[in-house]
Image (cartoon, helix red, strand yellow):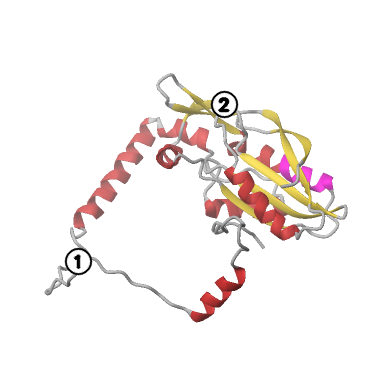
């Protein structure tokens, strides 16, 4: 893999502070602990012809400045309990990779996997990783990887769309730090209790088994189904790596945006 040229990007935004995790953040944090992963959302896409380095720098600065979650890192208590820390300002590196003779799109996908697989420090690393591919002096593709504490898969698509449109109004809805503060208030506790009662009532009305027991139990107990598709097999054969090369990796749901 080619080495990156690093461009320092300064940013500043509203919403700084420290507090507990919101309920949604607590849920995804438990999933991260179980899976031993920062559960990154990664995507890449082509840049419009004529995109300059300043254009890409402005994109990263806009992303970091507009969204408090992009400036959120964690701080851990002695017992391991995490708290969110939103910074008012900072500096982040934009990575530029020269494709050389390689296909820029293929390089963008390899870079997405590389950025997703690189170790992540919840206390020190910014939860956004951005890189761009350059070929023949022209910037061709943009790669963005985000920690799941920033957004989920569908939210990532909204965020990437905002990168193109650049709205300058307030970010709609409560941000996690403000949300966590509200959730700790009596109205927040009442809403939580009402939501739990609502879901409890639904669960109690559901049958214990969705499907009835079959009249005749088959033998053996466990069965295996296999779907065969000649066209799919043909495509897989054509894309099979050469002997000795690493196995292919399936791209994530958000591996590319239009």
Please tell me whether mark 2 sits on a helix, a strand or a loop. Answer: strand
Q: Is residue 238 left or right of residue 191?
A: right
Residue 50: give x, y in percent of width and height. 86, 57
Does the magenta-highlighted stretch encompass residue 92? no
How far apart, in angstroms, are the residues tagged by discs 1 and 2?
A: 56 Å
Query: Start and end of the magenta stretch?
Result: 53-61
Residue located 74% across and 42% down the image: 95
Q: Residue furthest bottom?
A: 230
Question: Which residue position is annotated with label 1?
Answer: 221
Residue 232: give x, y in percent of width and height. 52, 75
Q: Nearer the viewer, residue 156 or 244?
A: 244
When the figure is inspected, residue 198 is found, relative to residue 258, above or below; the finding is: above
Q: Is residue 118 left or right of residue 32?
A: right
Quadrant occupied by the C terminus? bottom right
Question: Which residue position is annotated with label 2?
Answer: 17
Which SS type dominates the magenta stretch?
A: helix
When the figure is inspected, residue 162 is found, relative to residue 177, above or below; the finding is: below
| First along the sequence among labels 1 and 2 | 2
Q: Residue furthest left?
A: 215
Residue located 64% across and 60% down the image: 257
Residue located 45% across and 36% down the image: 22
- Which of the 4 quarters of the picture holds residue 124? top right
Please tell me whether mark 1 sits on a helix, a strand or a loop. Answer: loop
Residue 121 in sight from this viewpoint: yes
Q: Residues within 10 Å of mark 1 (few under 14, many from 20)?
A: few
Residue 58 in sight from this viewpoint: no
Q: Nearer the viewer, residue 244 or 258?
A: 244
Q: Residues within 10 Å of mark 2 (few under 14, many from 20)?
A: some
Question: Residue 185 got which mark?
Answer: none
Q: Residue furthest front?
A: 243
């Amino acid at each position: 893999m080619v080495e990156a040229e690093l461009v320092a990007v300064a940013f500043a935004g509203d919403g700084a502070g420290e507090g507990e995790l919101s309920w949604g953040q607590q849920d995804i944090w438990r999933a991260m602990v179980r899976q031993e992963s920062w559960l990154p959302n990664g995507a890449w896409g082509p840049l419009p012809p004529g995109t300059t380095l300043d254009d890409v720098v402005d994109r990263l600065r806009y992303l970091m400045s507009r969204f408090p979650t992009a400036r959120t890192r964690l701080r851990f208590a002695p017992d391991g309990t995490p708290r969110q820390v939103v910074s008012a300002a900072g500096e982040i590196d934009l990575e530029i990779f020269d494709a050389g003779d390689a296909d820029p799109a293929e390089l963008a996908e390899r870079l997405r996997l590389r950025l997703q697989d690189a170790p992540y420090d919840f206390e020190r690393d910014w939860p956004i990783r951005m890189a761009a591919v350059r070929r023949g002096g022209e910037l061709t593709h943009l790669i963005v990887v985000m920690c799941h504490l920033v957004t989920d898969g569908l939210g990532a698509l909204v965020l990437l769309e905002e990168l193109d449109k650049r709205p300058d109004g307030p970010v709609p809805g409560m941000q996690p730090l403000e949300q966590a503060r509200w959730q700790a208030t009596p109205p927040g506790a009442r809403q939580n209790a009402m939501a739990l009662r609502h879901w409890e009532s639904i669960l109690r009305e559901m049958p214990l088994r969705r499907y009835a027991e079959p009249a005749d139990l088959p033998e053996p107990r466990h069965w295996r189904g296999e779907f065969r598709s000649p066209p799919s097999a043909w495509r897989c054969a054509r894309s099979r790596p050469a002997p000795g090369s690493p196995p292919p990796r399936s791209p994530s749901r958000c591996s590319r945006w239009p």
